Image (cartoon, rainbow, N blue to C red):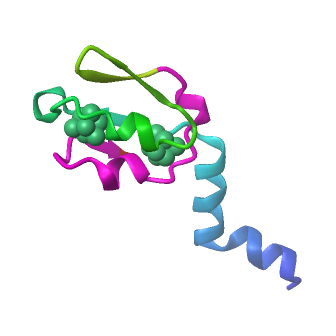
Amino acid sequence: MDIQNEKTNDAAGVSASLRETSLAQILIREAWCKGCAICAEFCPKHVFVMRGNLPVIVDLQACNRCMLCEVRCPDFALTVL
Ligand code: SF4
Ligand code: SF4
């Protein structure tokens, strides 16, 4: 068995490959959001803009799942899948 096949058949490798090709899903629980804009300010890919007191996803394709928005949201209003 060569190394290339081992990598291809590795379960973790398959999972990583799928993540690279599929869009992220970002759930915003509007009822929990207080409009602080931390998510929009810290997102390195400018995925959000604030409209009124809510973040709106304007460029989902740019999301690299770095999780900064989810981690920094003080109200647990964001989940990145
Ligand atoms: S996971 Fe990262 S890139 Fe994606 S929206 Fe959140 S902060 Fe932006
Ligand atoms: S960081 Fe959380 S509470 Fe603040 S605007 Fe974003 S989703 Fe809302």
Residue lying farthest to the left in this orientation: 31
Q: Can the viewer see residue 28?
A: no
Magenta extent: 58-79
Q: Closer to the camera, 29 or 55?
A: 55
Where is residue 64 drawn, in percent x and y? 57, 46
Q: Quadrant of the N terminus?
A: bottom right
In the rendered structure, does residue 69 fall within the stretch colored magenta?
A: yes
Which residue is depicted at the point 33% across and 40% down? 38
Q: Determine the image quadrant of residue 78.
A: top left
Residue lying farthest to the top in this orientation: 52
Where is residue 72 drawn, in percent x and y? 32, 52
Residue lying farthest to the right in this orientation: 2
Where is residue 13 drawn, in percent x and y? 65, 67
Q: Closer to the camera, 25 or 68?
A: 68
Indicate left or right for 52 with 58 as reference. left
Which residue is depicted at the point 53% across and 32% down? 46
Q: Can the viewer see residue 39?
A: yes
Which residue is depicted at the point 43% across and 53% down? 67
Q: Is residue 61 above or below residue 7?
A: above
Indicate left or right for 16 with 70 as reference. right
Where is residue 40 drawn, in percent x and y? 41, 34
Q: Determine the image quadrant of residue 33.
A: top left
In the rendered structure, does residue 76 fall within the stretch colored magenta?
A: yes
Q: Is residue 58 above or below residue 63?
A: above
